[in-house]
Amino acid sequence: MVLDSQALQHLEIIEAADGKLEGSLLHYVDHCSTSFGRRQIKKWLMAPLLDTEQINERLDAVHDLMSF
């Protein structure tokens, strides 16, 4: 699923209502230490998965990365 600009704005995914990053979902979930990771998490938030199997694969990948 790809969220359109109106959905991203109303759900405050990328930026809060005041136009700042602080207060948005991205601000709260972005604990990335690299710009690549930051871009990837933003991409994931803008296009959430619908398939349960793909969601579980992504969760497993994140879990594996956090175990290092």
Image (cartoon, rainbow, N blue to C red):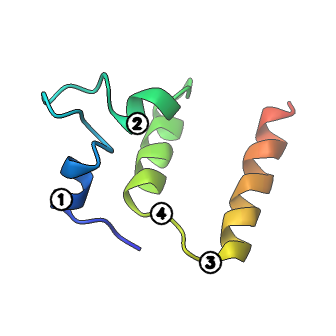
Residue 26 circle label: 2
Secondary structure under badge 1? helix
Q: Earlier in the sequence, mark 4 or mark 2?
A: 2
Closer to the chain start, of discs 3 and 1, is 1
Mark 4–mark 2 distance (CA, rounded to whole Å): 13 Å
Q: Do labels 3 and 1 touch, CB within 8 Å? A: no
Mark drawn on residue 5: 1
Mark 3, secondary structure of its residue: loop
Q: Which mark is residue 48?
A: 4
At label 4, which amino acid type do we have?
Pro
Q: CA distance from mark 1 to mark 2?
A: 15 Å
- Residue 19: x and y in percent read 14, 30
Q: Could you say where residue 65 lies in the image, as x and y percent from the top left?
A: 78, 40
Q: Which mark is residue 14?
A: none
Quadrant for residue 64, please give it.
top right
Q: Position of residue 61 (x, y in %)?
A: 76, 52
**Image location of residue 18, percent across then percent down:** 13, 27
Q: Residue at x 46, y 32 (%)?
A: 35
| Number of dots carrying numbers | 4
Q: Are marks 3 and 4 in contact (CB under 8 Å)?
A: no
Residue drawn at x 86%, y 33% is 67
Q: Is disc 2 surrounded by few (<14), some (14 to 19) or many (20+) residues within 10 Å?
A: many
Of the numbered discs 1 and 4, the one sitting upstream in the chain is: 1
Tell me, for residue 51, which label it has, or none: 3
Q: CA distance from mark 3 to mark 4?
A: 10 Å
